[in-house]
Image (tube, rainbow, N blue to C red):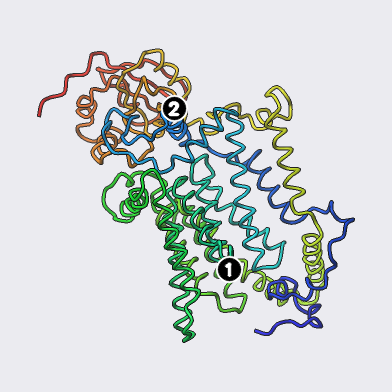
Amino acid sequence: MKRCSAALVPRCPAWYTASMGEDAAIQTLPSQDPRSVWIPSIFGLTICLVVVATTLSLHIKADDIWWHLKTGEYILTNWSLPDQNIFSFTAPEHAWLPHEWASEVVFYAVYTWFGHKALIALGIVLNAIACALIYGLTVRYSRSPFLSALITVLATLMMLGNFSLRPYLFGNLFFIFTLHAMEEPSAGGRLRPVFVFLLFTAWANFHGSFIIGLALILLYMVASFTAQIRARRRSFAPLKSLAIDLGVAVVACTFTPHHIFGLIFPFTYLQNAFSGKMTYLTNISEWQSAGFSTPLGRMITFYILFCLFAIAGSGVMPSPIHVGLLVAFSVFAYTTIRNIPLLGIAATPVLARHLPRALGRAWKRLLGRTPIFGLTERLHDNSIRIERRARKLLLPVLTFAALLLVFSLPASCGVSYARLTGIRDMADLSPAFYPRGLLARIQQRGSQQRVFQYFNWGGAFIWALYPGQRVFIDQRNDCYPMEVFLDYFAVHELEGGWRGVLDRWQIDTVAYPPDEPLARKLRQEPGWTVDYEDDQSVLFARRLAPPPPREE
């Protein structure tokens, strides 16, 4: 495909010329104008949009934060990591490897020292930083701040589906950093091994998704090797550099309190997720397949089709590595719901490289030299000039300053975070996962009860009741043997012998949502009585003590 010369720039769409690498229009822009320091950049507007939306409208969730907080509390109190399932009475001796311990310590420290609003703000800031890094990745290829903002917003929407206070917020950041490093082989220079080592050491201690980072490097190695073979070159310097990256990253992942076991642990998740056998992940929603006919599956399909439109419409042969990224993470997204945000991130280089050309060519063919075409050309040229002249961090800094003010004001103030959002504490972020009245009633009943509680409430029970009370099961999927999961779902789904399961575990009380089949069934059972009930939960107590367990 021919490049547009400087003389032809007015005849070529700006979206097209801006993606050609050496853009004559950009080259002719004036240098920094001191009078334009207050012009907002497209980058700044994008980050502000993300921050404002996630603060006031698309609230971060707190589904699983509770057991993470309790783990962080345990680590900072005892200065050691638990190696057994200390929060449960059904599997107290089952091995537990808390591979996200650094995230949990950070969450608990922020929550304890600065309060729940600081923890919420931390999640918002981490998401905003991820979006800023995505923008930087896209603008490298597109040279178009306007379309870079569009691609960033699309990736953000893919990420917001799982926008929750969980360690994977850190995992997303590390993934984007790694993608930046792979897209820029010379980044870091001689200190690149040090950068890779520090990156993966932190990643391995903050979140188990570091295994995806290792797979990302391996994917780039395969693409580099294939390119060298096809080009019939004898120089394998890029492949050697990537091999060093992979070796350093693997070694770095063993620098955790778990050593080599911390490196091996994520492979058990992958094995269980893709084995097709009955495992502890079988009934966990985020580990389910998105499929093709579900709303999430259709969203993935539309996003992939949009990427294919960009590739086909650009008229440029896609890079093998970018095709590999799109294919690999599309498979990940379809097979496991929790990987959908990673598809939004991994597809950004494809969109950034091809979307400006595709839209420019399509726009030119549809509108030619109509006034609308000229208007879009001027809009794009102005966006480039704004981005070139503006202080990019001005708006984000002002936005974060306003965010700090909103979070700092007391709840009685009309523009405080509590008044603007209606969120007065952590439980308001995900009220369905934190039954306040039920927890208060169980505390009144005393400790050392055996409660069969709803799965989604396990983390809240751990945070509010441990160590006086332990749980039957909770969201820490790897902390329970398969037998406990089978017992839980036997009761939850009222399978044959469900009463025997409650007897065998000597269950004193059952805590469940009132509209669940188990709750409706227990209302009819003569051996159970309602001890507490509200709109969110109901607590059943045995009329008589549970029978002693039978000897095998």
Image position, residue 67 (x, y; %)? 43, 33
Determine the residue located farthest toward the left in the rendered image.
Answer: 552
Residue 205 appears left or right of 429:
left
| Up/down of 12 relative to 108, above or below | below
Determine the residue located farthest toward the bottom in the rendered image.
Answer: 232
Which quadrant would the C terminus be assigned to in this image? top left
| Up/down of 291 relative to 319, above or below | above
* Dot 1 crowding, Cα within 10 Å, few <14, some 14–19, many 20+: few
Which residue is depicted at the point 59% across and 45% down? Answer: 126
Q: Quadrant of residue 499?
A: top left
Label 1 element class: loop
Residue behind mark 2: 77
Q: CA distance from mark 2 to mark 1?
A: 43 Å
| Up/down of 528 relative to 29, above or below | above
**First-in-chain label (2 vs 1):** 2
Image position, residue 179 (x, y; %)? 54, 61
Which residue is depicted at the point 28% across and 27% down? Answer: 89
Determine the residue located farthest toward the front in the rendered image.
Answer: 190
Amino acid at circle 2: Thr
Specify whether residue 341 is in view. Answer: no
* Dot 2 crowding, Cα within 10 Å, few <14, some 14–19, many 20+: few
| Up/down of 545 relative to 339, above or below | above
Q: Quadrant of residue 473?
A: top left
Q: Which mark is residue 69?
A: none
Which residue is depicted at the point 81% across and 77% down? Answer: 10
Amino acid at circle 1: Ser
Residue behind mark 1: 186
